[in-house]
Image (cartoon, grey):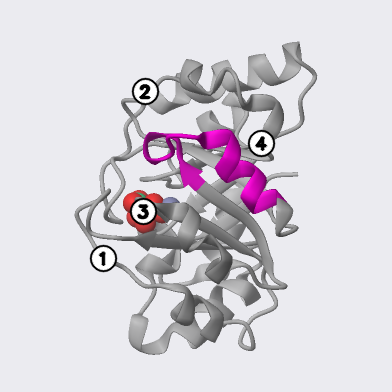
């Protein structure tokens, strides 16, 4: 089943709870949290306190995307009863297996993200240890950037490997996802679609979600 994970980076920060509730009512399955440190990416977003402030405002599980260096020390702060995934970047983790174990030991599903310039082969030795692989289709840091189509082939390759090795990780795509590219991404094997500006910029979120599911069905 294909899931939608709106990135609250594109929400109205002064009305975060209302925006989260709005997309929840529209029928999405996860809330994507873009955590940025100003080092790994050239932007600073928000931290665990802001994320936790949404706990009582929505029932949606959290999909935490850490675009930060030295993730290990702050990972515990993102563990809540609603945290389904914590996703770290391959480019930031010198001992990736250790970081994935740390996340799993908290009872959270570990995921790993790849920047557009990092090949799928960089994950060859850890694919059996992850619950999710996130393919970035923009260089991380900002919402509203242009989709980089090279990610489509990476999704296809990952889906092939998953089948060959009989693995079951989810494939997530993040960056520039729109109603225009959803179908080709779904056909390539995407399970979870992160969407920021396209959904939050739509006049009617429920209508956008209906159009999305029509496009991918
Ligand atoms: C980029 C973030 C994305 C982004 C998505 O660094 O990881 O989640 O906010 O926003 P759109 O869909 O507008 O590219
Ligand atoms: Zn993200």
* Real-space CA distance between mark 1 and mark 2, rounded to the nearest whole angstrom: 26 Å
Q: Is residue 154 above or below residue 44?
A: above
> Nearest the camera: 184 or 103?
103
User: Tag 3, which secondary structure?
Assistant: loop
Decide if ligand 1 comes within 8 Å of the CB at mark 3: no
**Between marks 2 and 3 in the image, the one whose residue lies nearer the viewer:** 3
* Real-space CA distance between mark 2 and mark 3, rounded to the nearest whole angstrom: 24 Å
- Residue 111 drawn in magenta: no
- Residue 93 drawn in magenta: yes
Looking at the image, tell me whether mark 4 or mark 2 is earlier in sequence order. 4
Residue 68's tag is 3
Q: Residue furthest right?
A: 166
Tell me which segment is drawn in magenta: 88-104
Badge 2 crowding class, 10 Å Cα cut-off, few under 14, some 14 to 19, many 20 or more, is few
Residue 36 is situated, as x and y percent measured from the top left of the image, at 33, 60
Decide if ligand 2 comes within 8 Å of the CB at mark 4: no
Badge 3 crowding class, 10 Å Cα cut-off, few under 14, some 14 to 19, many 20 or more, is many
* Real-space CA distance between mark 3 and mark 1, rounded to the nearest whole angstrom: 10 Å
Q: Residue furthest top?
A: 164
Residue 44's tag is 1
Residue position marked by numbered label 2 in the rendering = 150
Q: Is residue 204 visible?
A: yes
Residue 130's tag is 4
Decide if ligand 1 comes within 8 Å of the CB at mark 1: no
**Between marks 3 and 1 in the image, the one whose residue lies nearer the viewer:** 3
* Real-space CA distance between mark 4 and mark 2, rounded to the nearest whole angstrom: 22 Å
């Amino acid at each position: 089943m294909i899931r939608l994970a709106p990135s609250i980076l594109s929400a109205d920060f002064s009305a975060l709870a209302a925006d989260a509730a709005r997309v929840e009512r529209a029928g999405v399955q996860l809330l994507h949290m873009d955590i940025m440190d100003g080092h790994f990416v050239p932007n600073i977003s928000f931290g665990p306190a802001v994320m936790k402030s949404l706990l009582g405002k929505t029932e949606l599980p959290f999909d935490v995307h850490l675009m930060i260096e030295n993730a290990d020390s702050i990972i515990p702060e993102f563990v809540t009863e609603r945290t389904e995934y914590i996703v770290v970047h391959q480019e930031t983790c010198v001992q990736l297996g250790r970081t994935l174990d740390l996340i799993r030991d908290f009872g959270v599903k570990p995921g790993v993200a790849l920047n557009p310039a990092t090949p799928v082969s960089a994950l060859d030795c850890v694919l059996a240890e992850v619950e999710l692989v996130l393919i970035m289709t923009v260089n991380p840091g900002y919402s509203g950037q242009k989709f980089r189509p090279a990610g489509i082939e990476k999704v296809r390759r990952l889906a092939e490997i998953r089948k060959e090795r009989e693995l079951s990780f989810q494939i997530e795509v993040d960056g520039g996802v729109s109603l225009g590219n959803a179908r080709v991404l779904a056909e390539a094997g995407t399970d979870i679609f992160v969407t920021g500006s396209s959904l939050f910029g739509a006049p009617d979120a429920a209508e956008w979600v209906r159009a999305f599911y029509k496009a991918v069905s």
